[in-house]
Amino acid sequence: MNKVEILEGAQKAILESDANRATELAQRGLAEGIDPIELMNEGFVLGINKVGDLFSVGKLFLPELLMSSKAMEAATGIINAALPSTANKGKGKLVIGTVEGDIHDIGKTIVASLFKANGFEVYDLGRDVPIPRFVEEAERVGAHLIGSSALLTTTMTGQKRLEEELKESGLREKFKTIVGGAPVTQRWADRIGADAFAEDATDGIKKAKQLLEQG
Ligand code: B1M
């Protein structure tokens, strides 16, 4: 199989909710030397985005969405594990999680893995994380950055509450905040007063480095 066939196959495996095929293609893609992030973005993510589009127009229903997610989780597990781990953990500490009420964690976990691979010390709180937990954990570990993910228009408000919580507790200047997730935009980040918006995992690393350089 060549690279194009693997990437197309990856997309199709997610569309067809085929976890075995997704697993096989994730392993195969890595073995063929495809860059893990490219394999993710140009293959599996295109598949899950199509699933999301079909779901939103009623051409596919929740059970299929769940099964495609399982296939996606199988592939991302393999790809995340393959991201190079670095012994140099000096880049900064990041606390990250998906906000309260929101159980979408595929993208957040990719972001966490890429930060780890880039030398950040990552404290991943998981999904459906109560807003005060972000602040408590950031204080506990002496984080530099707090990253929050929201995939639902109804849970994006959690990112706003995080900003408010930080201000109310007098800790806003202590941490840099980065927001991300499919419905999240630069405009939203500006509106709520977050320090940065990240489009994807790679952009997250770029923005984090910029924020830390600014001090
Ligand atoms: Co849900 N879901 N879902 N879902 N789901 C969406 C988000 C939706 C857009 C689908 C649609 O209708 N088109 C829609 C939201 C509509 C809206 O709010 N306007 C939706 C809905 C409605 C729902 C339910 C309400 C469905 C229901 O029950 N009726 C329900 C909600 C449950 C809840 O959270 N309370 C639900 C459930 C689920 C599953 C559990 C089945 C599953 C999630 C499984 C899991 O995550 N473990 C699921 C999935 C898979 C999706 C879609 C199809 C795909 C999400 C995904 O994994 N994308 C999604 C449609 C879509 O987004 N196109 C959809 C791939 C991932 C790599 O991208 O997460 O965007 P993403 O992350 C990117 C960037 O956004 C960024 O970097 C990542 C990597 O590039 N990023 C960050 C993300 N977080 C960041 C944090 C950072 C920086 C960057 O900080 C440093």
Image: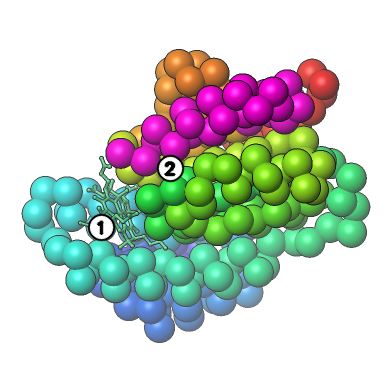
Amino acid type at image mark 2: Ala
The disc placed on residue 150 is 2
Which residue corresponds to the image point at 14% horizontal and 61% vertical from the top-left? 60
**Which residues fall within the magenta stretch?**
154-177
Residue at the disc numbered 1: 51
Give the crowd class for mark 1: few <14, some 14-19, many >=20 residues within 10 Å: many
Which residue corresponds to the image point at 47% horizontal and 46% vertical from the top-left? 99
Which residue corresponds to the image point at 81% horizontal and 42% vertical from the top-left? 142
Image vertical order of residue 120 relative to residue 68, above or below = above
Magenta: predominant secondary structure element? helix
Q: Is mark 2 within 8 Å of ligand 1?
A: yes
Numbered disc in front, either 2 or 1: 2
Classify mark 1: helix, strand or loop.
helix
Question: Could you say which is closer to the camera, residue 140 or residue 176?
Answer: 140
Question: Magenta span has 155?
Answer: yes
Q: Is residue 199 visible?
A: no
Classify mark 2: helix, strand or loop.
loop
Question: Could you say which is closer to the camera, residue 20 or residue 166?
Answer: 166
**What percent of the width, then of the height, locates residue 26?**
52, 72
